[in-house]
Image: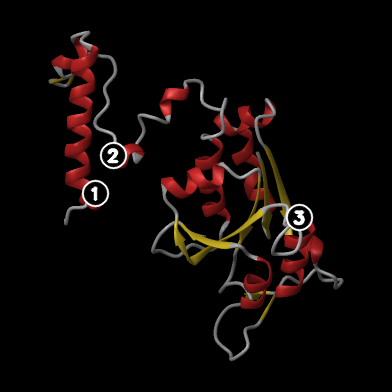
Amino acid sequence: MRIQVITLFPRLFEPFLRESLLGIALREGLVEIAVHDLRDWAQDRHRTADDAPYGGGPGMVMKAEPLVRAIEALAGPKGAGRRARVLLLSPQGRRLDQARLEGIAREQHVVLVCGRYEGVDQRAIELAVDEELSLGDFVLSGGEVPAMAVIEGVVRLVPGVLGNPESTRAESFQGGLLEGPHYTRPEEFRGLRVPEVLRSGDHAAVERWRQEQARAVTRRRRPDLLGEEA
């Protein structure tokens, strides 16, 4: 899988891409990730990528010209024959969930566009963006952290990245449930003991317990996943 990122702050991604599963996946060639500075596509000597909004108001708006040039250089023009799926990280986008991450993971090539400031010139969105995505109903300074979340969520779904392929099967949101509680050694800590069933060696009983706990946790914290009201 190939992921490319367009951002005004490419250095934010350097430590993120070196560590943990991402770093291993990149070093082993399981994924390819490239981060590009949007200002490389600006054509004035100041490398301008933003300007004041029409109609007045606070803040700045990302300019259409360099952004469209950058996207088309990496993904091709919007429409049939495009080389990559172009996703803009934006508060106005569809809320990201596990199902959408799984869909993105099936793409061969994705371009993530990190918004900044007050937003992106709407013409860039209409001319060059395939889809807008949001992490949720809150505002960040830019799309870099959401882009990292997408990368993290997608790369771990790429075959070979996780040491145990079963890990994704038993995770939260698989089958519409959150994961239940987890325990490890010691057996007792400050008077709290690991549930007996987890120490029983009865794998069928453990699985039943985990399903029961997952349903209980989901009903308590996210009843909407079960089609219930809070």
Residue drawn at the location 56% of the way across and 33% of the way down: 158
User: Which comes sooner in the sequence, label 1 or label 3?
Assistant: 3
Residue at the spot of label 3: 74
Say which element carries label 1: loop
99 left or right of 198 in image: right
Is residue 175 placed above or below 117 in the rendered structure?
above
Is residue 213 placed above or below 9 in the rendered structure?
above
Q: Quadrant of residue 189?
A: top left
Q: Position of residue 117 (x, y in %)?
A: 58, 70
Q: Is residue 188 visible?
A: no
Q: How many marks?
A: 3
CA separation in Å, label 3 and label 2: 37 Å
Nearest the viewer among 209 and 56 is 209
Q: Kindly check if marks 2 and 1 are in contact, taking CB atoms under 8 A apart as contact.
A: yes
Q: Position of residue 110 (x, y in %)?
A: 64, 49
Nearest the viewer among 201 and 117 is 201
Disc number at residue 17?
Answer: none
Q: Residue furthest front?
A: 80
Residue drawn at the location 24% of the way across and 13% of the way down: 203
56 left or right of 178 in image: right
Nearest the viewer among 186 and 218 is 218
What's under tag 1, amino acid-wise?
Arg
Residue at the spot of label 1: 222
